Amino acid sequence: MSLTVGILIAKVGHPDAFMVIATVFGAVGSGLFTTFTLETSNGKWIGYQIIFAVSSSISSLTPLMMTQASLPLRDIPIGSAMVMFFQTIGASIFVSVAQALFTNGLVNGLEHTGMTGFDAGTVASQGITNLTKDLSGDIKRRVLVVINDALTQSWHLTVVLSCIALLGALAVEHGKMKKKT
């Protein structure tokens, strides 16, 4: 997908438009993830993942192409390294934030079902699969609903970050990418 996007950007010459498209797909895709229920069909969640994957593919490549197109030749390595650094550090930070949101939501939700004795460390060390392993009937369904709710709540962070990224995408210099000679 990234290769196709790179070719399209090179042909069209407007990476700024692709940045806007990527952030819109990111906001829509992650917003759709927040609608998951236990009854969400395979077709829906696969389609939602495709929408989000389009965003990921475009948004990982476009900033590098814009950096290479806008900087003098001698500054491209530094600019590209900075883009990759900030993409990596941002992902590292916000994956941890999303994990904390999920774990806290899961622990709080489990306490509301009447299941006690869970803390973030216990949930993290035992894993989700072990939470439902010996359960059946109504209590298993309630725990699955809690897991689903915790997952969908953690996706709200991605929706917010995608919407904030849209502001940045709209603020970049608009125009046709110039070819380096």
Image (cartoon, helix red, strand yellow):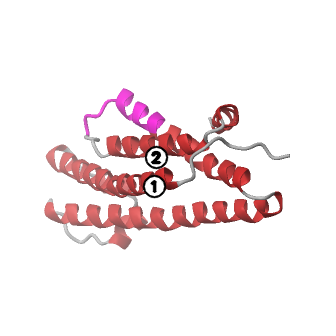
Q: Residue 8 at x, y = what percent?
A: 65, 32
Which quadrant of the figure contains the N terminus?
top right
Query: Residue 108: which quarter of the image?
Result: bottom left
Magenta residues, as a range? 38-51
User: Residue at position x 28%, y 61% from top?
Assistant: 106
Mark 1 or 2, nearer chain start: 2
Q: Residue 167 at x, y = what percent?
A: 43, 55
Numbered mark located on residue 76 in the image = none
Judged from this view, the residue extending furthest toward the top is 43
Which of 168 and 123 lies nearest the eye of the viewer?
Answer: 168
Query: Pointers 1 and 2 in contact (CB under 8 A)?
Result: yes
Q: Residue 178 at x, y = what percent?
A: 73, 44
Numbered mark located on residue 165 in the image = 1
3D distance between C-alphas at marks 1 and 2: 6 Å
Left or right: where 147 falls relative to 22? left
Judged from this view, the residue extending furthest toward the right is 181
Residue of label 2? 23
Query: Residue 150: which quarter of the image?
Result: bottom left
Q: Residues within 10 Å of mark 1 (few under 14, many from 20)?
A: some
Q: Amino acid at mark 1?
A: Ala
User: Residue at position x 18%, y 66% from top?
Assistant: 111
Which of 152 and 10 lies nearest the eye of the viewer?
Answer: 10
Q: Residues within 10 Å of mark 2 (few under 14, many from 20)?
A: many
Q: Amino acid at mark 2?
A: Thr
